Image: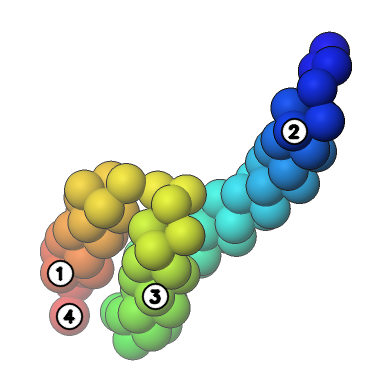
Amino acid sequence: MANLRQSKKRARQTVRKTSINHARKARIRTFVRRVKEACQSGDREAATAALRLAQQEMMRGVAKGVLHKNTASRTVSRLSRRIRDLPT
């Protein structure tokens, strides 16, 4: 347990930021799941729209420091490949 004033404050901040980051990651996973579900249903338009929203959310996570930029880019690339391979 922290003893100094500053270390106690840091511990409080860490708890708060951890919960916010957890919520952000969960939100990103939800958007990615929606893209995958749209791909499984075979609806290309819905999947494309969902990908656009998921990409925005992931890049927001990158800006906030929740995700690494390469991780987000890799995920977007894989999702777009799934959409591209859907039957027309």
Q: Position of residue 76 (x, y in %)?
A: 26, 60
Secondary structure, mark 1, is helix
**Which one is closest to the eye, mark 3 or mark 1?**
3
Residue beneath label 4, please? 88
Which comes sooner in the sequence, label 3 or label 1? 3
**Residue located 26% across and 53% down the image:** 69
Mark carried by residue 9: none
- Mark 2 is surrounded, within 10 Å at the Cα level, by few (under 14), some (14 to 19) or many (20 or more) other residues, namely few
Mark drawn on residue 84: 1
- In depth, the one of 64 and 9 nearer the eye is 9
Q: Which amino acid does the dot numbered 1 rest on? A: Arg
Residue at x 51%, y 65% (from the top left corner):
31
Q: Which residue is mark 3?
A: 56
Q: How far apart in space, not on screen, are marks 4 and 3 (Cα)?
A: 25 Å
Mark 2 or 4: the one toward you: 2
The residue wearing badge 2 is 6
Secondary structure under tag 3 reads: helix
